[in-house]
Amino acid sequence: MEIDKIPQWILSLEQEDVTFLKNFVLKSGSLKEIAKTYGVTYPTVRLRLDKLIQKIEMSDQKEEEPFTTFVKGLAVDSRIDLEIAKIIIEKYKKEKER
């Protein structure tokens, strides 16, 4: 596949996310098998998958501004609290309207 044909959501993933996705496919989507592979619990794998889904969904929202996407990414990666992210984004939108 040519690089310009690769979907943006794939290109936006970090290497460890791509590896997780590959393992997920190779294990036929079995979260129990993925948990064994990584040596973690099922809820841990479920949380990781949920975050990966959020990253992909965010990448598909091209109409959003880069700053908003950045703040949401911080929340998805648990670097900031989701409620704090919402406050920052709302403040940003209000300031931009001025």
Image (cartoon, rainbow, N blue to C red):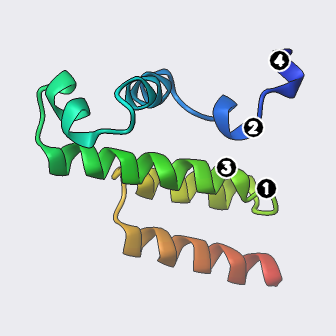
Is 53 rendered above or below residue 84? above
- Circles 2 and 1: CB atoms closer than 8 Å: yes
- Rounded to the nearest angstrom, the CA distance separating label 2 from label 4 is 10 Å
Disc 1 on helix, strand or loop?
Answer: loop
Under tag 3, what secondary structure?
helix
Sequence-first tag of 3 and 4: 4
Circle 2: residue type: Gln
Residues at marks 3 and 4, CA–CA distance in whole angstroms: 17 Å
Say left or right for 10 vs 26: right
Quadrant of the rendered image containing residue 30 = top left
Residue 50, above or below 9: below
- Asked whether disc 4 touches disc 1, contact meaning CB atoms under 8 Å apart, the reply is no
- The residue located at (67%, 49%) in the rendering is 59
Q: As rendered, which of 14 and 23 lies closer to the eye?
A: 23
User: Circle 2 sits on which residue?
Assistant: 8
User: Furthest-front residue in view?
Assistant: 28
- In the picture, the disc for residue 62 is 1
Mark 4 lies on residue: 3
Which one is earlier in the sequence, the residue at label 3 or at label 2? 2
Residue identifier under label 3: 59
Neighbor class of circle 4 (other Cα within 10 Å; few <14, some 14-19, many 20+) is: few
Label 2, residues with CA under 10 Å away: few <14, some 14-19, many ≥20:
few
Residue placed furthest toward the top: 2
Amino acid type for the residue under numbered disc 1: Lys
